[in-house]
Image: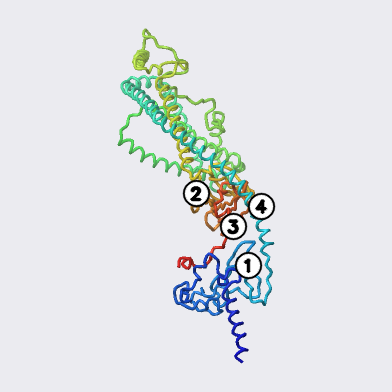
């Protein structure tokens, strides 16, 4: 009996050994080589759970019983189900899976070596060589793309750094020159102000003489315009009297609709006239308080306004009677109506209905203060008060550089005109200089990446066409959605994160009952600048996936090691504090 038990004990012991360790490197099953020091017993054969919660015999590791609260004692069995099992995947890429997936009857693709199904119930062939070959082929292809993209990126960097250097030099040059440009504008402004001050001083000193000359110049025109205003008001009053008579004396029993329409229109005119007169009384009160004496030009304008207002009233009343004449009932033989029509017929030949003006009456133009159409020099020997005043003003103006006021149209440019042109030119140069400085400052201060690689992409516009829409982005500019019309999706606002591979475009057109449109441009390495996909993860928030050489950085040493899968080890997905113990 005892002899019989020995083989059984030996078998159980061997079984525990196989469960506890991996067959290839004598580490506990499911433990990566880099974590071997964490699974080493002490001198007494004891081992501490990785969370430090308790100590157990090392033989209890992978005994298919969960002893440690963190499950760290069962890296190679599904007993705890909370840890991670390491698949070495020789010939391909190592990986981790949850221990809960061990011996579950499923060949997990992450473990191409079939090590996840070790209890013999499920056969999982080792396909790592085949999978690894495909993976390596794809990786080699990506590496070729990355290598070419990196070559282009280096060209971008050279261009960007050279461009930034030139922009800074241009900016420094413009900023240095801006002081002299500003000074030139200030100097020409001072010259213009001095010329204007000289003119103002002259005009003030000769005000009385010029006003007297202007009074004599406009006197006959004011008289002529006043006569026209009086004549227009006389005709206006004639029409008012005529319509007052029509309103009072027409035969109200006839109920002639044309007559009633004319009277109704006249009543509306009288009501509007009443409002105007009330407003004028208020203004007259203010004017009397100011007691301002009108100049000749103001009196001329007042006469013109009075003439215009009277003609406007004449035109309105003329039309009222004219329309009545065309539509009234001739069978009624209403004396008041016939009287009004007679007044209209007698006046009509003198009135231009289309322009609201008297036939043959041309507008009186107000001449310039300095001279009329024919500019003739007034000689000292010419007699008359106007000639004497004119010559005195001419001589005085010439002494201070303002003789142009008394010369004909072919005279050379005045001091003020020259100063004004010089100031306009200098201020325009100052404006252009400031505008150019601001443009350069914006370019110099734009973040094109730590080595300026993205400067090459400035204003490059890339399209992505779908069935219904075409999506575009002009890098560092604006993103749009195009169909029958363009819709702004936002303008460049910032980079997201510190990796310089994601741009944000914000402030686009607002969605109906939604937010402003925006775009996130996520960049991956490629040999061309192109958008490869567009989606809308949230309402009016778009995602552009883009390939560009600008993010094809130099391969790190770790990345170079990726070409040989046997030299790599998967990163443990669990808590990092285990690695620190």
Say which residue appears at 60% left-offset and 46% top-offset: 149
Q: Which residue is mark 4?
A: 466
In x, y percent, where is residue 323?
58, 40
Q: Position of residue 456 (x, y in %)?
A: 55, 41
Q: Are marks 1 and 4 in contact (CB under 8 Å)?
A: no
Q: Height in image: 404 above or below 318?
A: above
- Label 3: how many Cα within 10 Å (few below 14, some 14–19, many 20+): few
* Residue marked by disc 3: 536
The percent position of residue 342, horizontal first and vertical second, equals 55, 34
**Mark 4 or 3, nearer chain start:** 4
Mark nearer the viewer, 2 or 1: 1
Q: Secondary structure at mark 2?
A: strand
Question: Between marks 2 and 1, how big is the CA–CA gap?
Answer: 45 Å
Colour mapping: rainbow
Please tell me which of labels 1 and 4 falls first in the chain: 1
Which numbered mark, 1 or 4, is in the foreground of this view? 1
- Residue at point 66% right, 76% down? 120
Return the disc, 2 or 3, that comes first in the chain's sequence. 2
The reply to whether the C-beta atoms of the residues labelled 2 and 4 are less than 8 Å apart is no
- Return the mark for residue 111: 1
* Residue indicated by mark 2: 493
- The secondary element bearing badge 3 is classed as strand
The span from disc 2 to disc 3 (Cα, nearest Å) is 19 Å
Image height of 223 relative to 339, above or below: above
Mark 4 vs mark 3, CA separation in Å: 13 Å
Q: Are marks 1 and 3 in contact (CB under 8 Å)?
A: no
| Mark 4 secondary-structure assignment | loop
Tell me how far mark 1 sits from mark 3, CA to CA. 35 Å
């Amino acid at each position: 009996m005892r002899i019989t038990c020995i083989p059984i004990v030996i078998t159980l012991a061997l079984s525990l050994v196989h469960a506890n360790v991996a067959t290839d490197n004598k580490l506990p099953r499911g433990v990566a080589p880099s974590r071997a020091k964490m699974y080493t017993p002490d001198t007494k054969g004891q081992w501490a759970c990785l969370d430090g919660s308790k100590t157990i015999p090392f033989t209890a590791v992978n005994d298919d019983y969960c002893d440690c609260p963190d499950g760290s004692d069962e890296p190679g069995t599904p007993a705890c189900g909370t840890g991670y099992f390491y698949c070495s995947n020789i010939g391909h890429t190592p990986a981790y899976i949850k221990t809960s997936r061990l011996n579950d009857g499923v060949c997990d693709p992450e473990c191409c070596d079939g090590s996840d199904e070790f209890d013999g119930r499920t056969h999982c062939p080792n396909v790592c060589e085949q999978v690894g070959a495909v993976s390596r082929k794809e990786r080699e292809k990506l590496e070729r793309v990355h290598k070419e993209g990196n070559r282009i990126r280096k060209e971008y960097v050279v261009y960007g750094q050279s461009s930034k250097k030139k922009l800074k030099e241009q900016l420094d040059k413009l900023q240095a020159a801006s002081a002299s440009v500003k000074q030139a504008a200030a100097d020409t402004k001072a010259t213009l102000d001095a010329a204007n001050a000289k003119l103002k001083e002259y005009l003030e000193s000769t005000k009385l003489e010029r006003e007297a000359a202007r009074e004599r110049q406009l006197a006959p025109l004011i008289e002529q315009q006043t006569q026209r205003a009086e004549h227009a008001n006389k005709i206006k009053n004639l029409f008012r009297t005529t319509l007052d008579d029509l309103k009072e004396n027409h035969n109200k029993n006839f109920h002639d609709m044309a007559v009633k329409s004319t009277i109704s229109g006249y009543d509306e005119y009288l009501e509007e006239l009443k409002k105007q007169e009330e407003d004028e009384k208020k203004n007259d009160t203010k004017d009397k308080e100011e007691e301002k004496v009108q100049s000749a030009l103001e009196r001329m304008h007042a006469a013109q306004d009075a003439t215009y207002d009277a003609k406007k009233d004449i035109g309105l009343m003329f039309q009222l009677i004219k329309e009545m004449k065309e539509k009234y009932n001739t069978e009624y033989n209403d004396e008041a109506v016939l009287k009004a029509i007679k007044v209209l017929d007698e006046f009509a030949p003198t009135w231009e209905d289309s322009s609201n003006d008297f036939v043959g009456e041309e507008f009186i133009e107000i001449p310039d203060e300095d001279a009329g159409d024919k500019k003739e020099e007034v000689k000292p020997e010419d007699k008359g008060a106007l000639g004497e005043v004119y010559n005195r003003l001419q001589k005085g103006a010439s002494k201070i550089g303002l003789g142009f006021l008394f010369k004909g149209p072919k005279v050379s440019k005045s001091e003020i005109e020259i100063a004004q042109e010089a100031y306009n030119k200098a201020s325009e140069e100052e404006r252009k200089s400031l505008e150019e400085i601001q443009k350069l400052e914006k370019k110099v201060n734009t973040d094109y990446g730590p080595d300026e690689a993205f400067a090459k992409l400035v204003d490059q516009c890339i399209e992505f066409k779908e069935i219904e829409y075409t999506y575009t982005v002009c890098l560092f500019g604006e993103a749009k959605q195009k169909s029958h019309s363009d819709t702004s999706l936002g303008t460049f606002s910032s980079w997201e994160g510190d990796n310089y591979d994601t741009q944000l475009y914000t402030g686009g057109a607002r969605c109906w009952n939604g937010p402003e449109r925006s775009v996130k441009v996520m960049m991956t390495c490629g040999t061309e600048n192109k958008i490869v996909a567009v989606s809308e993860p949230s309402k009016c928030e778009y995602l552009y996936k883009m390939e560009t050489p600008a993010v094809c950085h130099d391969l790190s040493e770790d990345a170079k090691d990726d070409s040989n899968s046997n030299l790599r080890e998967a990163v443990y997905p669990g808590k990092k504090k285990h690695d620190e113990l």
